[in-house]
Structure formats: C-alpha cells, structure tokens
Image (cartoon, rainbow, N blue to C red):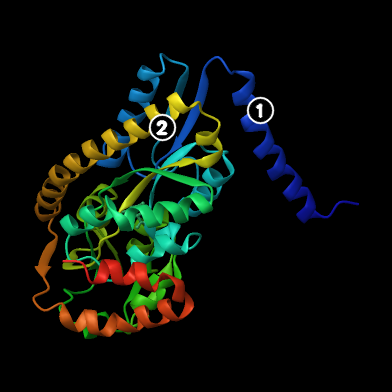
C-alpha cells in the first residue's frame, strides 16, 4: 500500500506535470502565472503588471498572463520552489528568503553590506548582480531585473531602539533565513522566522514584539497600527528580483527571450522610480497614524555586534569570500 508520504509526493508530481501540460495544450496563447506577495497598489505590483503587459503586447498576445497579488499563490519560500519547478512562471522575490536556496543570493542579506541604496543599484547592475544571477540560474531561476526594496529598519510595540541593548530580550520576527536569526541573536534578541502574512496578527497579540522592514511594507501591511516605534537602523538593504522560471524561459524562442529580458529591465526602471515616491508617502502615512520615528544616531555598535554573522557565513561559504569582499570593499 502506498504510504501517505508517497501519495503526497505523487499528487505534488501530478500538479507539477498537469500545469505545464495545460499550458502546452493551449499553445496558441500561453498563460503565465505571476506570484506577488504585495497588495496590488505597491511599486513591485505595478512593475510586475507593466512587465506582463509589455510581454503580451510585444508578442502580439501569443503570451499572456496574470499577476496574483497579496500572496494568494502561497508563501514566499513555497513560491520560490514552484518557480524553480516551472509551476509558477515568474515572481518578484526578496533575495532574503531566496538565500536559503541560493548561497550567492545570501551575500546581500549580510547586515550593513551595502553602504547605501545607490551603491546597491550600482553593484547589482554590475559584477555582483551577474554573480548572483549565475547562482540563481544554477537553481532554475533567471533574474530579469533587480527591483528596489529600500532599506529595512527595526520596529516594535515597546520602545524606540537606539542601541543594541534595546533589542535585548525583544521577540523579533524575521524572514525565513538563518542569517537573520543569527543577526537578531547577535543583538541579544529572540528571533522568530515567520511568513509575512502572519506578522500583523502576531504583533497585535504579542506573539512577537517587533519586526524589521522598509517603510512601504511597514505601512502597506498596517503593521504601524500595532507596532508604533520605528527606529531607522537601515541594517539590511536587500534587492528584489523579478525572477522567471528557467523552465519557462528556456522554452521560449530567442526572439521571445529578448522581449522578456527587455520588459524585465524596463519594469525594474519603473519600479525603482515608484519606490522612491512610495517611500515618502508611506513615511507620511505612518507619521500621521501616530508612529514614533527615531533615527539611530550611531550605527557602529550595531555593525560591531552583528560582525559574527559575517564570520559564520564565510566559514560556511568560503567560496563566496570574493563576492563578499567585492561588495564590502566597493566605494
Ligand atoms: C518585504 C518584501 C517581501 C518580504 C517581506 C517580509 O518586499 O518580499 O516577504 O518584506 O518581510 O519588504 O517577509
């Protein structure tokens, strides 16, 4: 008799096989599915919609698709796996959760590795981005464009954070990646990896005291209603990737691949522009909603406390030393 596990495996396989088959049998107009964690009015969401529109227009409707917003196609770690398998065709992912599967991508999740968002753009559009793309491709993912996600800072329901000691004993939600657990523990906090969709309720009920994110995500999820202290630490500048399944990409003609690559780049430009505008608007919204924002004057103690995260990362990934140094030593 088949075990439950093998039945589960068989049904996962059936889904994996059924979806590409359905797409192939409707070969006249291929219908892609795009995964997005954010609400539809968000810079990432507009970037993805414009990508799909441009691809449809330039292929004269041979390729169409739908972007599923608000995480309705599942959590981020699951969606990354589904893109790798070609079950979901594309998505915008934070390189944070991607780092669990792709070590090269993890380099940008090292705290304070970029000096500024501008520097991040420059490096991602150059050698560092190319190295990360190569790592993604090995895992079945093609990067079509790097999206902006600003810088992440701490917020919580208890108090302003000014020094690492203020994080001691706080229960802090992090994205699903061991690096972030190490990062919070290096400050003496208790890290709780948790899906994005669960954070609001967990803040509200006190399952966690705080989290960390950029202002647009802090605002669009209404976390600011239940965690009123936002302390600008900017400890993580993590780019996001408009990513396509290699299964989907490799099935395209060279001409369609060129269309997709071009549309990906154009959508990243749009998203970056919208990002800057949204960041300002989000800050205004949270301030009007009663958030107490403080700038952390001295970030050096945070950087120093978090340095063991680098040590253990490099110990586990000695082959990534050059990539880490390329970013760390850049002007
Ligand atoms: C947001 C990212 C999103 C992450 C989320 C999180 O855009 O991809 O899932 O943070 O904290 O800024 O989980």
Q: Distance between the residues labelled 2 and 1?
A: 20 Å
- Residue 79 position (above or below residue 162): above
- Residue 51 position (above or below residue 62): below
Q: Which mark is residue 21?
A: 1
Using the image as rendered, state which of residue 9 and residue 256 is in the foreground.
256
Asked whether residue 82 appears in the rendered view, the answer is yes
Is 87 on the left or on the right of 95, as rendered? Answer: right
Is 96 on the left or on the right of 273, as rendered? Answer: right
At x 30%, y 41%, the residue is: 44
Q: Residue 67 carries which label?
A: 2
At x 26%, y 80%, the residue is: 167
Q: Where is residue 90 in the image (x, y as percent from the top left)?
A: 45, 38
At x 23%, y 71%, the residue is: 329
- Residue 285 position (above or below residue 191): above
Is 167 on the left or on the right of 199, as rendered? Answer: left
Q: Tell me the crowding category of disc 2: few under 14, some 14 to 19, or many 20 or more residues within 10 angstroms, Cα based.
A: many
N-terminal-most mark, 2 or 1: 1
Q: Which residue lies furthest to the right in this view?
A: 1
Q: Where is residue 245 in the image (x, y as percent from the top left)?
A: 50, 41
Q: Which of marks 2 and 1 is in front?
A: 1
Quadrant in which residue 195 is drawn = bottom left
Indicate which quadrant contains ligand 1.
bottom left
Quadrant in which residue 13 is drawn = top right
Using the image as rendered, state which of residue 181 and residue 323 is in the foreground.
323
Label 2, secondary structure: give it.
Answer: strand
Is 280 on the left or on the right of 255, as rendered? Answer: left
């Amino acid at each position: 008799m088949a075990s439950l596990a093998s039945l589960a495996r068989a049904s996962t396989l059936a889904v994996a096989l059924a979806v590409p088959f359905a797409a192939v049998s409707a070969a006249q107009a291929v219908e892609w599915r795009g995964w997005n964690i954010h609400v539809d009015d968000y810079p990432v969401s507009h970037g993805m919609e414009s990508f799909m529109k441009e691809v449809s227009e330039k292929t004269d409707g041979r390729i169409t698709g739908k972007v599923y917003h608000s995480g309705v196609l599942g959590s981020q770690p699951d969606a990354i796996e589904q893109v790798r398998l070609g079950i979901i065709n594309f998505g915008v992912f934070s390189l944070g959760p991607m780092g669990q599967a792709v070590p090269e991508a993890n380099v940008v999740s090292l705290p304070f590795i970029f000096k500024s968002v501008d520097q991040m753009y420059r490096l991602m559009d150059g050698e560092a981005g190319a190295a990360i793309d190569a790592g993604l491709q090995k895992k079945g993912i093609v990067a079509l464009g790097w999206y902006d996600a600003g810088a992440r800072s701490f917020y919580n329901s208890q108090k302003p954070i000014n020094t690492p000691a203020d994080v001691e004993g706080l229960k802090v939600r992090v994205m699903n990646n061991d690096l972030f657990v190490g990062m919070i523990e290096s400050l003496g906090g208790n890290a709780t990896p948790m899906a994005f969709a669960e954070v609001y309720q967990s803040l509200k009920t006190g399952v966690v005291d705080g989290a960390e994110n950029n202002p647009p995500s802090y605002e669009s999820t209404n976390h600011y209603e239940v965690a009123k202290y936002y302390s600008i630490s900017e400890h993580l500048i993590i780019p996001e990737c408009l990513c396509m399944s290699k299964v989907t990409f490799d099935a395209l003609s060279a001409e369609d691949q060129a269309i997709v690559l071009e549309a990906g780049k154009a959508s990243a430009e749009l998203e970056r522009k919208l990002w800057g505008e949204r960041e300002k608007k989000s800050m205004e919204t949270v301030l009007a909603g009663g958030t107490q924002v403080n700038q952390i004057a001295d970030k050096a103690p945070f950087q120093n406390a978090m340095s063991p995260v680098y040590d253990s990362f490099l110990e586990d990934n000695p082959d990534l030393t050059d990539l880490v140094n390329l970013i760390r030593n850049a002007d």
